[in-house]
Image: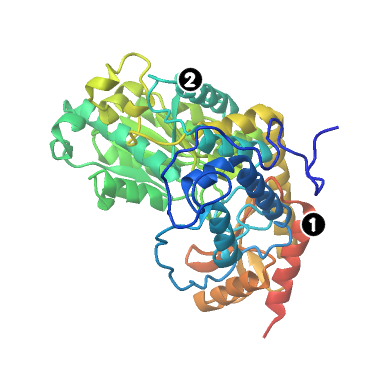
Amino acid sequence: MDARDEAGTPRIPGSSPAGDHLPGIPEGIGAPEETGTSGGTRGSLGADHARVPELLEATRAYAVRLLGGLDDRPVARAPVRPAPAPLPEAGIGLEGAMEEFAKRWEPGFAAGAGPRYLGFVTGGVTPAALAGDWLTGTLDQNPTSGLDSLAPDLEREAVAWLRDLFGLPSEHEGTFVSGATMSTFAGLAIAREWLGERRGVSVAEEGVAALGPVTVLSGSPHSSVVKSLSMLGLGRSAIRRVGLLPGREAVDVARLAEELDRLDGAPAIVVANSGTVNTVDFDDLRAIAALREHHPFWLHVDAAFGAFAALSPGHAHLVAGLGEADSVCVDLHKWLNVPYDSAIQFTRRRDLQTRVFRNSAAYLGPVGDDPDFVHLTPENSRRLRALPAWFTLAAYGREGHAEIVRRDVALAAGLGERIAAMPAYRLLAPVRLNVVCFTLTGSPSPARIDEVVDAITASGEAFLTPTVHEGVPALRAAFSNWRTTEADVERVAKILQEVASRP
C-alpha cells in the first residue's frame, strides 16, 4: 500500500513527512523582530526554508482541494476587484501568504481547468502535465542554452514527439514559445527574412526598411496575425483578405490564385487556417501549396488547435498537407491540456530562423548546426515549457491524447444537436470539430447576447464567450478539456435552456 497522510490522501513518492527540515538555512534573512521556532525569523526566508517539506505538503493539500472542487466550483465569476493592499514590509511567510491568497484572491478565480469552461479555446491540465509543471518550477531550468544541463535535449525530444503527433515531416524543426501569438510572430519573422532572401537583402541585418512593400494574403486571419505584422514592422495594412468559399470561413483557393497572379511574380506571405476560431473551418492546404508551382510565397499555417484533428481518424483529412507549410503554429495549452503558457512553432528554414533570432554573445559560443534555443526565439531566457508537455506525452502517449480529442469532438457534436433542437437558439455553422457556434433565434442584438453570456456566467454552471459570425452576434462553446463528459454537456444544455426562457 502507498503511504497516506491523516486525511487518507496518497503522499507524493519520496516526500518527507511534515516537520522534516532542510539543511543550509540562510541566516540573517527576514524581519528581526520575531523569532521562529524552526530556524530563522517568522516570515523570513530562513524560517520558510526550514519548513519546506511541511509547507509544500500544505500547498499540495490546498491544490488537491482545489482540483477536487473543480466540478462544483463556479465556472467563472464577474470580477469584483478587491481593495489594493500595501506591499508588506516584514512579510508574513509562505503560510501567511497562502492564507491571504485563499481569503482575498482565490474565490474570485475562474475554474478555467474545469470541465464546463467552454470559453475561448481553453484546455485543462492533465495530472501528468501538472506534475511536470510543478517540477519545472522546482528545477528552475533555463533551457535556452546547452552549457549546463540536459534541459534543452529534453525539449528537443518533446519537440520530436509533437512533430510525430501532428504528422509533420522530419525537416520541420520546432521550438517552444509562450502561445499562438508568439508562435505566429516567430513564423512570420522567418517569413519576413525569406522575403528578404528573395529580394537580395537581409532584414535581420539591414532592417525592415530595406525590404520594401510586403503583401500578406489570408482568408480568415486570426487577430494574432495582424498583431504580429504590427510588431514586425510590416504593418497591419500589409494583410489583404482573400474571398472565402460560400457560407464558409475557408479561403477560396481560386481567388487566392487570382490575388497571387496580380502580384506578377513578387514574393508574398500566405497565411492559411487549420481551424478558424468561430466555426473551426479548414483551408485546403494541399491546393494552396500546389500554387507554389507558379507563385513564390511563404506558407504559414495557423493550426493553433486544429492541428489536433490529426489525432481523430474521422477528421485527419482536414489537416492533410500541413507538412507542406513553411511554418506552423500550434498552441499546446489548448488541446494538449498543459498549463499556460505553452505553444510550439515549427519551420523548415531553421537557417533563416537563426539569422533572425541569433543572440551574439561571446559566452554563448557559435550558433553551430544544432543551435541552442537562445538563437531561435525572441526570448533569451525562459522556463522549461517542454517539461509539462513531455510528462503528459510520456504518461498518456498518442492514444491517450487521441482519446481526449475524439471525446471532445463527440461532446461538441452532442451539444450542437441539443442546441439545434431548442427553439430559442439556432446554429450558425455545422459543428466541424470542437466548437459550437450559435445564436438566438430572430435578430439577436449584441446587448441580448451579452445578457445571455452574463446570465450563464452568473449561474456558475458554465462559461461561454460571445463572438460575431458573418455580422451576427453569437456565442461559442469550445471543447478542449480532458475532464469534460456527457454529464457536463447536459448541465450546459440545461442552463442554456433556462437562460433562454427568462423574460
Q: Is residue 310 visible?
A: yes
Relative to residue 462, is residue 180 drawn left or right? left
Q: Secondary structure at mark 1?
A: helix
For image coordinates 45% across by 19% down, the residue present is 171
Residue position marked by numbered label 2 in the rendering: 150
Q: Please say if 221 is above or below 477.
A: above
Q: Amino acid at mark 2?
A: Leu
**Label 2 environment density (alpha carbons within 10 Å; few <14, some 14–19, many ≥20):** few
Residue sitting nearer the eye, 100 or 421: 100
Residue 17 is situated, as x and y percent measured from the top left of the image, at 71, 38
Residue sitting nearer the eye, 65 or 299: 65
Residue 371 is situated, as x and y percent measured from the top left of the image, at 35, 19
Residue position marked by numbered label 1 in the rendering: 487
Spatial distance from mark 1 to mark 2, Cα to Cα? 43 Å
Residue sitting nearer the eye, 21 or 120: 21
Q: Please say if 381 is above or below 28.
A: above
Q: Amino acid at mark 1?
A: Ala
Residue 41 is situated, as x and y percent measured from the top left of the image, at 49, 50
Q: Is residue 433 visible?
A: no
Relative to residue 55, is residue 290 drawn left or right? left
Q: Secondary structure at mark 2?
A: loop
Residue sitting nearer the eye, 121 or 303: 121
Q: Are marks 1 and 2 in contact (CB under 8 Å)?
A: no
Which of the two labelled residues, at mark 1 and mark 2, occupies the earlier sequence position? 2
- Residue, far bottom: 503
